[in-house]
Image (cartoon, rainbow, N blue to C red):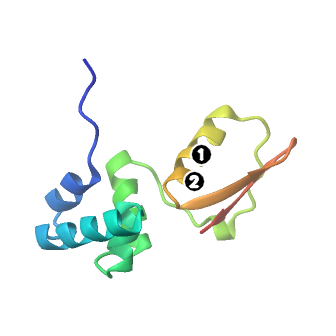
Amino acid sequence: MKAPAYKIEYALLNKDLISKEQLDKAKDVQVKEHIKLEDALVKLGFLTYSEIIQFFSSQYNLPIFDINKANITIESDRTMRKLLEILSSRSFVDFATSSHSTEMQTI
C-alpha cells in the first residue's frame, strides 16, 4: 500500500501561511488556468515566490542560497542533477545541460 501523497495545501494551512478561503480561491484559479497551486497563490497575491521557497526550505530542511550570486558548474553529479530536475519541475529554477556542465538560473 502506498503512503498518502504529500499535500502542500495542508502544510500551508497548518503553518498559517494562507487561509482556507485563500486556498479555495487559489484552487479555483489552479483548475481554471491549468497552473500549479503555488503559481495560483502568487498570481492572487496571497504569497510571493520568495515565501514559497522559504516554505519548501523549512519543510525539507534545505538551505536557501542566491544562485544569481554563484557560478555553478556541475560535472556528472547525479544527485545534483536530480535536485535540479525537482526544482525545475516546481518552477523555481530552469537548467540547461550540455555534455560537460549544467547551468542553472532562477525563473
Q: Residue at x 49, y 60 (%)?
A: 64
| 104 to the left or right of 9 | right
User: On the image, numbered disc 2 is attached to which residue?
Assistant: 88
Q: Residue at x 34, y 68 (%)?
A: 32
Q: Give how far across and how far down residue 48 sits, in percent.
A: 38, 76
| 89 to the left or right of 2 | right
Q: Is the residue 49 above or below the residue 103 in the image?
A: below
Amino acid residing under circle 2: Ser
Q: For the residue labelled by badge 2, is the local secondary structure a helix, a strand or a loop? A: helix
* Quarter of the figure that contains the N terminus: top left
Which is nearer the eye, 63 or 86?
86
Amino acid residing under circle 1: Glu
Which is nearer the eye, 74 or 44?
44
Q: Residue at x 66, y 70 (%)?
A: 68
Q: Residue furthest right?
A: 100
Q: Residues within 10 Å of mark 1 (few under 14, many from 20)?
A: some
User: On the image, numbered disc 1 is attached to which residue?
Assistant: 85
Q: Give how far across and how far down residue 77 sits, in percent.
A: 71, 35
